């Protein structure tokens, strides 16, 4: 009929005795129970941070401060007077390159300064070179290497000084020729090829034979810049040349490092100043009761020509494997049982376990019951060469189960043999949390530093790449339900 409402069909579930429920109420109750269960699980579970296991590398390195020795020649002034420089510091100079001048009466030096201050002596080529240096630095600049800014500033100042002074010298060439004829103006040119340096520290003539503890006292080291005074007295240094690309870094060795390097001849080092690396040949010499590592390099000297001491890392090796944070590593105590006592349970599960006879208070034992266990680690008793014992009866299994206590004994399948559980041992490991609960996994540590550890890959009872482990291993227990943040 028009205007009559249709009756809705409702599904009713009838129970014996006349009780009945609407199916909608059942669904609602099920959803409500599910939500309550999840809320309860969330509130009662331990909330932890997780870490995803990745492959990584840790460098095995040791930090040292080394003493630099080079073949250095100091050149002294033959006259007294005003001192001017024409080549920037730490620059390669060929034989005959003009380095500096000494003006006995100061007239030429005064004219040089006047011309330089007029800003009219930079040639187009000089300007182009300076602009090119600035562009190259700006193009390659990175915030992570901000320290290079100071080196660039020093290089640019030296380049500008070189261009200005050389330009000024050419501008007053007629006047300088007159002064040279009168033997009051003297030019100093490089007597042989080398790297020019405008400082002295009194250690230019030190050799390997002179090594002593006092040479490593940096607080006593005095470096004298030759460019600060502007004048020089006869017999005082005006520059020095490093005339050989071969140079040495001397390191005081401790017994442990000496043992590591004893039977080798070459090692890799990293310079902390600029993070560059180099390979160096080395020898070990003992002087006055102290062992010294003599690192010999044949390139890169010019980068550190202004240094007498340098901080380096000796890179002994690299360890690669699964990289985990040290905070994830914890220890767990296990019962030790002969591996041969492990057996498989009945049924289709084939679960590994032990036939356990629990000790009663009166000292007797219960009948054997099958208790599932996990062998977290099998000690195969390897010999000194790393070869495992072929007799499996000597293998020891590390097991853990709350139902198994010290004093219980285990039975061997189809045998009257019994073994009383008395011994325990600890293993280092991490907690795998892939499935929402903590599972202890044993690890084989290859190398550790202050923050991370490299563990072996592919171990039978260990972890694998992309596993999720607890970031703080000491905060949870085996089997504990967890929620990751």
Image (tube, helix red, strand yellow):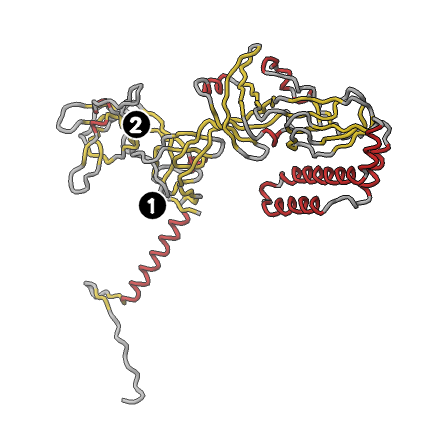
In the image, residue 162 lies at what x, y percent?
A: 72, 37
Q: Residues within 10 Å of mark 2 (few under 14, many from 20)?
A: some
- Residue 250, position as x, y percentages in the image: 57, 20
**Where residue 381 appears, x then y in whole percent?**
28, 22
Q: Residue reaching furthest top?
A: 288
- Numbered disc in front, either 2 or 1: 1
Q: Residue at x 50, y 18 (%)?
A: 283
Q: Which mark is residue 435?
A: 1
Along the viewing direction, whichever of 400 and 328 lies nearer the viewer: 328
Q: Residues within 10 Å of mark 1 (few under 14, many from 20)?
A: few
State which quadrant residue 353 falls in. Answer: top left
For residue 350, which quarter of the picture? top left
Mark 2 or mark 1, which has the lower sequence index? 2
Residue farthest toward the left in the current orientation of the protein: 414
Residue for point 57% across, 32% down: 272
Q: Which residue shows up at 19% across the image and 32% down it?
A: 343
Marks 2 and 1, how far apart at CA = 25 Å
What secondary structure is marked by label 1?
loop
> Residue 168's quadrant in the figure?
top right
Q: Is residue 279 left or right of residue 433?
A: right
The N terminus lies in which quarter of the figure?
A: bottom left
Q: Which residue is painted at 44% across and 43% down in the image?
A: 49
Q: Is any atom of residue 361 visible in this view?
A: no
Helix, strand or loop under label 2: strand
In the image, residue 402 above or below residue 284: below
**What mark, if any, has residue 335 been given in the picture?**
2
Q: Position of residue 2 (x, y in %)?
A: 29, 89
Q: Can see residue 448?
A: yes
The furthest residue to the bottom: 2
């Amino acid at each position: 009929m028009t205007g009559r409402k249709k009756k809705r069909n409702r599904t009713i579930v009838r129970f014996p005795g006349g009780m009945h429920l609407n199916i909608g109420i059942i669904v609602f109750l099920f959803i409500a129970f599910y939500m309550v269960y999840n809320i309860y699980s969330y509130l009662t579970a331990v909330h932890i941070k997780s870490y995803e296991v990745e492959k990584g590398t840790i460098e095995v390195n040791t930090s040292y401060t080394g003493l630099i020795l080079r073949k250095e020649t100091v050149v002294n002034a033959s006259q007294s007077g005003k001192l001017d420089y024409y080549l920037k510091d730490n620059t390669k100079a060929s034989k005959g390159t003009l380095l500096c001048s000494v003006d006995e009466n100061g007239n030429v030096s005064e004219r040089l300064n006047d011309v330089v201050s007029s800003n009219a002596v930079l040639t187009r080529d000089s300007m182009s070179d300076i602009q090119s240096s600035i562009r190259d630095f700006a193009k390659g600049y990175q915030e992570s290497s901000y320290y290079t800014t100071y080196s660039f500033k020093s290089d640019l100042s030296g380049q500008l000084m070189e261009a200005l002074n050389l330009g000024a010298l050419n501008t007053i060439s007629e006047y300088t020729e007159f002064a040279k004829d009168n033997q009051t103006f003297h030019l100093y040119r490089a007597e042989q090829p080398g790297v020019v340096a405008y400082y002295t520290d009194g250690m230019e003539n030190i050799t390997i034979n002179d090594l002593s503890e006092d040479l490593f006292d940096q607080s006593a080291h005095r470096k004298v810049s030759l460019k600060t005074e502007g004048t020089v007295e006869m017999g005082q240094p005006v520059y020095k040349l490093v005339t050989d690309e071969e140079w040495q870094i001397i390191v005081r060795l401790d017994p442990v490092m000496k043992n590591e390097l004893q039977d080798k001849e070459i090692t890799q080092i990293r310079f902390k100043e600029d993070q560059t690396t180099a390979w160096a040949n080395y020898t070990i010499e003992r002087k006055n009761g102290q062992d010294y590592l003599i690192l010999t390099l044949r390139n890169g000297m010019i980068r550190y020509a202004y240094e007498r001491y340098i901080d380096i890392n000796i890179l002994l090796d690299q360890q690669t494997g699964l990289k985990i944070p040290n905070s994830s590593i914890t220890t767990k105590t296990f019962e030790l049982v002969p591996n041969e006592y492990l057996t498989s349970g009945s049924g289709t599960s084939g679960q590994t376990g032990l036939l356990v006879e629990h000790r009663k208070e009166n000292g007797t034992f219960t009948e054997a019951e099958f208790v599932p266990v996990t062998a977290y680690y099998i000690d195969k008793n390897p010999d000194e060469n790393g070869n495992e014992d072929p007799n499996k009866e000597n293998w020891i299994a590390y097991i853990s189960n709350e139902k198994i206590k010290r004093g219980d004994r285990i039975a061997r399948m189809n045998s009257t043999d019994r073994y009383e559980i008395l011994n325990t041992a600890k293993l280092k490991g991490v907690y795998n949390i892939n499935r929402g609960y903590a599972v202890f996994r044993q690890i084989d540590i290859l190398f550790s530093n202050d923050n991370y550890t490299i563990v072996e890959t592919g171990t039978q009872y260990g972890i694998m790449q992309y596993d999720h482990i607890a970031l703080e291993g000491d905060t949870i227990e085996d089997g504990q339900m967890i929620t990751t943040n």
